[in-house]
Image (spheres, rainbow, N blue to C red):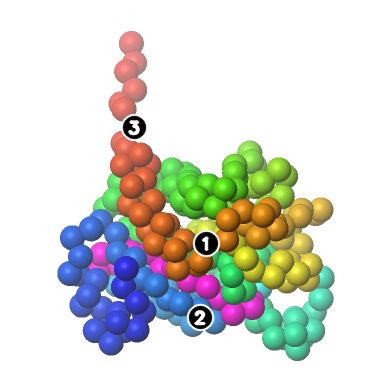
Amino acid sequence: MISLQDLLSDSFSLLNASGEPLVFIDCGIMPYRDALELQFTLQNKVITGEIPSLMLLIEHTPSITLGLRKDHNLLLQSETELTEKGIDVIQIRRGGGSTAHNPGQLVIYPIINLTNLKFRVAPFVHYLEQIGIDLLGKTGVSAERVARYPGLWVDGKKIASVGVQISHSVSMHGIAINIMNDLSIFDLMVPCGIDGVEMTSVKKERGTLLSIQELKTYAAERALALLPEFTKQPKEEIHG
């Protein structure tokens, strides 16, 4: 895994030195706006073929992001009040509604050329969810998908949010998984616009609290191992 400092100091040349189909970058803790700018920069470079597909593994300083579904962007305090609490509010172009980030939550941003890796959109989202399911399983927390509600759930409580944006076949945004973060930030909004949703985390579910660094390493391992399963091409239908 490459550190963000090494990547930036080497002007992206490190990315092309890997023989793997995905390169993983540890970004440490970063303000959301800085990470968003970095995603756009890397997405453009993947689109033009300057660098290979990659994943960013990151934690954020406190922030609330608003997605494309305006009816699902429900804040319970004004943006001014949230700013006064030290929470940055950002409108972005990923799918879904409002969600929150803060330290102790592991966020995975795939900057992936779906065409090159032979992904279709739906399997790609399921791929991200499966990374989350496997990661949570490593901590002893059993998470699952719920029909019509993107993300991951534990006994009816939401533990991970998923939202992607794809431009010229290259993705950005991704999956945010609650590990040991302060969940009170979600009390300031309606997560993903779902009334009555309860947020949870590995800590709240009394799972094994592995370090974020350990979980980043495991996420990278699972991301590579799961590629063959989710990039299989469907068999041709036989009509007769």
Residue at x 62%, y 53% (from the top left corner) = 207
From mark 2 to mark 1, how far is it between C-alphas?
A: 20 Å
- Residue 189 figure quarter: bottom right
Residue 227 in the image, given as x and y percentages of width and height: 33, 46
The label nearer to you, 2 versus 1, is 1
Q: Is residue 212 visible?
A: yes
Look at the numbered disc 1 and give the secondary structure of its residue: loop
Residue at x 80%, y 54% (from the top left corner) = 195
User: Is tag 2's residue or tag 1's residue first in the polypeptide sequence?
Assistant: 2
Span highlighted in magenta in the image? 46-63
* Amino acid identity at mark 3: Pro
- Magenta-drawn stretch contains 48: yes
Residue named by callout 2: 30
* Amino acid identity at mark 2: Met
Q: Is residue 173 visible?
A: no
* Amino acid identity at mark 1: Leu
Residue at x 63%, y 39% (from the top left corner) = 147
- Magenta-drawn stretch contains 47: yes
Residue contact at pointers 3 and 1, CB within 8 angstroms? no
The label nearer to you, 3 versus 2, is 2
Residue at x 44%, y 47% (from the top left corner) = 127
From mark 3 to mark 1, how far is it between C-alphas?
A: 37 Å
Look at the numbered disc 3 and give the secondary structure of its residue: loop
Q: Where's the C terminus, which quadrant? A: top left
From mark 3 to mark 2, how far is it between C-alphas?
A: 39 Å
Disc 3 crowd rating (10 Å Cα; few below 14, some 14-19, many 20+) is few
Disc number for residue 234: 3
Residue contact at pointers 2 and 1, CB within 8 angstroms? no
Residue 29 in the image, given as x and y percentages of width and height: 50, 79
Residue named by callout 1: 210
Side (left or right) of 227 relative to 75:
left
Disc 1 crowd rating (10 Å Cα; few below 14, some 14-19, many 20+) is some
